[in-house]
Amino acid sequence: MAAAGGRAPIGQRPGRGRLSRSAEFDRVFRHGRSHAGRDLVLYVFPRGVDDGSSRLGLSVSRKVGGAVERNRIKRLLREAFARESARLPEGTDAVVIARRSAKDVAVRDGLSGIQRALAELIDKVPGAAASSGAGVAVGTGGPEDGAGSVAVESAGEAGEASGR
């Protein structure tokens, strides 16, 4: 009956896959591992295999920019995480902290730049599936194109294109 009303059963979160409570963030910060990059910092904490899919928490401070810029970066981070989270071990909580330079990446490269920065950090997580190693191109409309389709080039095609 609860599901018919559009709500999750008691004790279960809706399928949004996000961290929302302060205690959830604290657990990831205190007991998880951090992986730092130039533009982002990734904290990961394995909840356990039986705890479902990966969940994301975001921290984008006012140092990054005004509300419009911060919201855009959060949208891009959520989309990049949706595309990359399958590589994380099952039941992992992740918190991504955007550094000031993340704004420059978002403006210059859009979703592809943010996804690339996040993928580099996920590569450092123990137990994470290996990156495909292929180039990822998002959209064709330039830096403002954050909703384009993803084109992945396989390693075989990349080798043939470079004359190998």
Image (cartoon, helix red, strand yellow):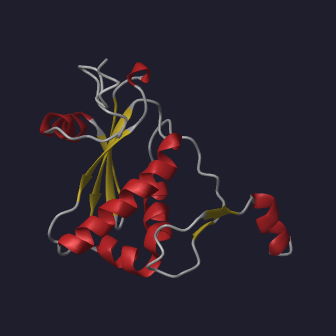
Residue 48 horizontal/vertical position (percent): 38, 23
Q: Position of residue 1 (x, y in %)?
A: 31, 17
State which quarter of the image contains the C terminus: bottom right
- Can residue 104 be spotted in the picture? yes
- Percent x, y for residue 111? 46, 67
Report the residue at 49% width, 67% height from top: 147
Residue at position x 26%, y 65% in the image? 71
Quarter-of-image position of residue 117: bottom left
At x 38%, y 34%, the residue is 92
Above or below residue 8? Residue 127 is below
In this picture, residue 37 sits left or right of residue 147:
left
Q: Quadrant of residue 151?
A: bottom right
Percent coordinates x, y for residue 91 in the rendering? 40, 29
**Is 117 on the left-hand or right-hand side of 152?**
left
Identify the image quadrant of residue 136: bottom right
Give the residue drawn at x 59%, y 51%: 131
